[in-house]
Image (tube, helix red, strand yellow):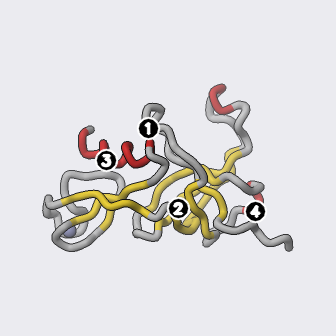
Amino acid sequence: MSETVPFWEAVDGGTLAVQRCADCGHQQLYARDACARCHRRHLDWAPAAGKGVVYSYTVVRRAPSKQFADEVPYVLGLVELEEGPRILVRIEGCEPDDVRVGLPVEVAGPGDAAGRRLPPFKPTFAPSQT
Ligand SMILES: [Zn+2]
C-alpha cells in the first residue's frame, strides 16, 4: 500500500517514522489515508526518535513455525514510542526475564523492509542486577 512507503524507507535506513497530521498534530501508526483524530487528510511523515517504553510484552517460548525454531525464547513487546504510537517489535539485548512494563527501550538495529521485519529494540540502559 502506497501510504506505507515512507515508513518502510525509514526502516531500511535504520530509523522509524510516524505519520503526522498537519492540521491537529496527531501522530499515528499504522499509516492511514486520514488522521485518526480529526479525520482530515493532510498527513506527512516525521522521523521518530526510536525510543519508548515497554507498554506490554510476552515471551514466546514455543516457535510459531519452523522459521522461528532457532529464535525461541524471544520477547515480543508492544512499545509506546515517545511520539505516542505503539509498535509491536522484538525486545533484544537482555534476558527475556529482564523485560518489564515501563522498561525504557530504543532501536537496536536495522529492520528489513523487503522482509517486512521491524527493527528490534533493546533496553536503553542495562537492567539492574536485583
Ligand atoms: Zn488530525
CA gap between label 4 and label 3 equals: 33 Å
Q: Which residue is mark 2?
A: 79
CA gap between label 4 and label 2 equals: 15 Å
Task: Name the foreground residue: 81 vs 76.
Answer: 81
Q: Residue at x 30, y 42 (%)?
A: 5
Quadrant occupied by the N terminus: top left
- Give whichever of discs 4 and 2 has the lower sequence position: 2
Three-letter code, disc 4: Asp
Task: Name the foreground residue: 127 vs 61.
Answer: 127
**Residue at disc 4, CB closer than 8 Å to ligand 1:** no
Q: Which residue is mark 3?
A: 6
Q: Residue at x 64, y 66 (%)?
A: 124
**Residue at disc 1, CB closer than 8 Å to ligand 1:** no
Q: Nearer the viewer, mark 1 or mark 2?
A: 1
Q: Which residue is mark 4?
A: 98
Label 2 crowd (10 A; few <14 / some 14-19 / many >=20):
many
